């Protein structure tokens, strides 16, 4: 598999994951909004339980998106993860391959 194929597979995977997140988030928000003022039957109401699960899902996905955004920002700005070069380098005549003739 070539380097270009890996990029395409990676992009398709990321888009699939993002689409799943968006669909789950939209479904949970719709259920929470639509069933928020239902006629409650009291304890052990299945609709209240579903609304609670949807609210927790929206909260968890929101937290995950914030964490991913912060981590991506830090990784992009510091450039530590993607860099192949060492962080600290010592310059010397030998490392610069300077020939010393007498
Ligand atoms: Zn209820």
Image: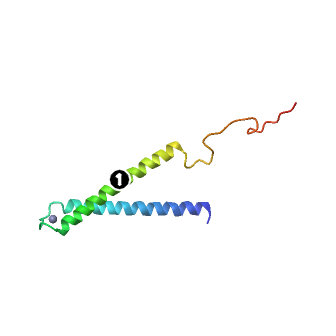
* 61 sits left or right of 38 in the view: right
The image shows residue 85 at horizontal and vertical percentages of 63, 45
On the rendered image, what quadrant is the C terminus found in?
A: top right
- 32 left or right of 82 in image: left
Q: How is the image coloured?
A: rainbow
Quarter of the rendering containing residue 54: bottom left
Work out whether residue 50 or residue 25 is closer to the camera in this orientation and state it.
50
- Residue at x 21%, y 65% (from the top left corner): 49
Q: Position of residue 76 (x, y in %)?
A: 50, 46
The quarter of the image holding the N terminus is bottom right
**Residue 65 place in picture, x, y as percent:** 38, 53
Residue beneath the point at 50% across and 47% down: 75
Check the image and report above or below for 67 versus 87: below
In-front residue for pair 37/83: 83
Residue 71 x, y percent position in the rendering:
45, 49
- Give the residue at the far top of this rendering: 102
For ligand 1, the image quadrant comes to: bottom left
Label 1, residues with CA under 10 Å away: few <14, some 14-19, many ≥20: few
Q: Quick check: is the Cβ at mark 1 less than 8 Å away from ligand 1?
A: no
Q: Secondary structure at mark 1?
A: helix
**Residue occupied by mark 1:** 63
Direction from residue 96 to residue 60 in the image, left or right: left
């Amino acid at each position: 598999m070539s380097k270009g194929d890996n990029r395409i597979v990676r992009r398709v995977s990321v888009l699939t994951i993002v689409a799943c997140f968006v669909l789950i988030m939209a479904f949970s928000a719709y259920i929470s909004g639509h069933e928020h003022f239902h006629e409650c039957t009291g304890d052990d109401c299945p609709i209240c339980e579903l609304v609670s699960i949807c609210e927790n899902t929206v909260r968890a996905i929101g937290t995950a998106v914030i964490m991913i955004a912060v981590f991506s920002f830090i990784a992009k700005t510091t450039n530590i993860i993607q860099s192949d070069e060492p962080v600290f380098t010592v310059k010397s005549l030998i490392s610069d391959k300077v020939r010393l003739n007498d």
